[in-house]
Image (spheres, rainbow, N blue to C red):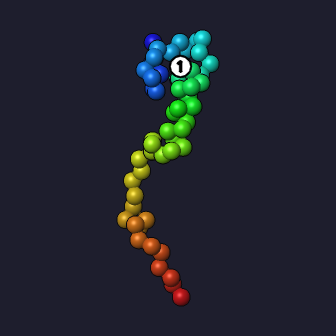
Amino acid sequence: MPRCPVCDATVDLVATPTVPFCSDRCRLIDLGRWLDESYSVPTSRKDDEDESPEDSD
């Protein structure tokens, strides 16, 4: 049985409408973590992105 990513409770995939979360509460906690930027998606930066664009006049 899968587990809720927030509270680690078991989740019934058939009976639970908030899959993969066990409840609306855990779903909202997870959303809040994304909005507070507690979570992030790792990205790789290119060397070009580190420099500011130069004016070419």
- Residue 23 occupies which quadrant of the picture? top right
Q: Position of residue 49 (x, y in %)?
A: 43, 65
Q: Residue at x 57, y 31 (%)?
A: 28
- Residue 50 occupies which quadrant of the picture? bottom left
Q: Residue at x 60, y 11 (%)?
A: 15
Q: Secondary structure at mark 1?
A: loop
Crowding around mark 1 (Cα neighbors within 10 Å: few <14, some 14 to 19, many 20+) is many
Q: Position of residue 7 (x, y in %)?
A: 45, 23
Q: Residue at x 55, y 36 (%)?
A: 31
Q: Is residue 13 left or right of residue 48?
A: right
- Residue 48 occupies which quadrant of the picture? bottom left
Image quarter in which the N terminus is found: top left
Q: Amino acid at mark 1?
A: Cys
Q: Nearer the viewer, residue 49 or 34?
A: 34
Judged from this view, the residue extending furthest toward the right is 17
Q: Is residue 4 left or right of residue 23?
A: left
Can you identify the residue that label 1 sits on?
22
Q: Is residue 57 above or below residue 6?
A: below
